Image (cartoon, rainbow, N blue to C red):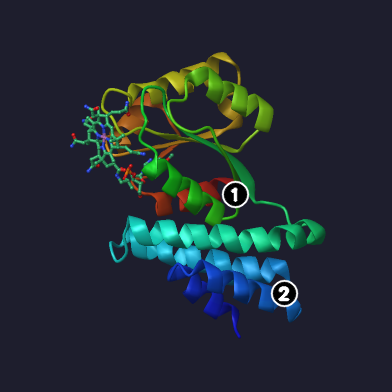
Amino acid sequence: MSLATISEVLQKGNSKEVVRLVEESLAAGVSAQDILDQGLLKGMGELGTRFKNGEVFVPEVLVAARALNRGTEVLKAKLVEEGVKPIGKVVIGTVKGDLHDIGKNLVKMMMEGAGFEVIDLGVDVDEEKFVEAVRTHSPQVVALSSLLTTTMNQQQAVIEALKAAGLRDQVKIMIGGAPITQSFCDEIKADAYTPDAASAAEVARAFVA
Ligand code: B1M
């Protein structure tokens, strides 16, 4: 059994089979790191590209993400044992006044798939909670999602609050959501706008590279 099989089965969203194959690979002596990189994360990365190209849709990504989570649960103990470190930390949330979380959850999954530890603050998150989370977790990236034209300005409020707290320069601020554009990103001086979850993960990876 090759690790490519894990990648393929993950993309089909078959959690049970992913768990079985991960256990089988561990038993055969394959390292948890290789299973993670060449099996699970590779699969999620490929699916992310297909999602970006419009070849698969939200439901497929959600079931694959569930399979990824089940697979990483099996690996977790081994990874800790092998001393594998996440590539970085991301604090993510949907801004104050906004309850939409499907896109935010996809960004979270893609970031996790890219190897980040993600601290998810949920929805309707005010600027002070973001500031507090940056102080507590020292992430490299803060990711803000907004789906409403009435809440997009809240992304700027988060940036201003981080500035006022003296934390702005310690993090890269990424923004996204249906009404967000590159010109809005330039206007509020965020560090990056990405139109979809897969490119958000790619840009976050580039920030910590
Ligand atoms: Co609402 N809603 N909604 N809604 N809703 C929209 C956004 C809307 C466009 C519908 C419409 O009128 N055509 C409209 C906004 C209009 C506007 O502001 N111009 C709208 C409205 C008005 C409202 C309410 C005000 C309705 C009401 O109560 N009168 C209300 C507001 C509640 C609130 O937030 N305070 C409301 C409520 C809801 C539900 C609760 C019913 C539900 C949300 C459920 C949930 O999220 N758990 C809902 C839904 C589902 C939608 C639509 C139909 C779908 C949104 C979605 O999940 N899309 C939406 C219409 C539409 O988009 N067709 C609509 C799928 C998701 C994968 O896409 O979130 O865009 P999206 O994420 C993408 C990218 O944007 C990007 O990556 C994702 C995937 O690649 N992305 C990022 C997102 N965040 C990112 C962050 C990044 C990078 C990329 O970096 C950090």
Q: Is residue 91 left or right of residue 83?
A: left
- Residue type, numbered disc 2: Leu
Task: Say which label, 1 or 2, has the lower sequence index.
Answer: 2
Q: Is residue 54 above or below residue 167?
A: below
Toward the viewer: 141 or 47? 47
Q: Which mark is on residue 160?
A: none
Quadrant of ligand 1: it is: top left
Residue found at x 60% / y 54%? 115
Quarter occupied by the N terminus: bottom right
Q: Which residue is mark 2?
A: 26
Marks 1/2: CA distance? Answer: 22 Å
Instruction: Please identify, in this view, whether the residue under mark 1 or under mark 2 is nearer the observer.
Output: 2
Q: How many marks?
A: 2
Disc 1 target residue: 116
Dot 2: what SS?
Answer: helix
- Mark 2 is surrounded, within 10 Å at the Cα level, by few (under 14), some (14 to 19) or many (20 or more) other residues, namely some
In the figure, 61 relative to 177: above or below?
Answer: below
Residue found at x 54% / y 79%: 4
Q: Would residue 5 appear left or right of 123 to someone viewing this image?
A: right
Callout 1, which amino acid? Phe
Q: Residue furthest top?
A: 164
* Picture quadrant of residue 103: top left
CA neighbours of label 1 inside 10 A, class few (<14), some (14 to 19), many (20+): many
Residue 135 image offset from top left, x and y in percent:
65, 25
**Viewer-proximal residue among 184 and 36:** 36
| Tags 1 and 2 touching, CB below 8 Å | no
Question: Can you give x and y, in whole percent of width and height, for residue 122 in the image?
Answer: 49, 33
Residue 188 horizontal/vertical position (percent): 38, 25
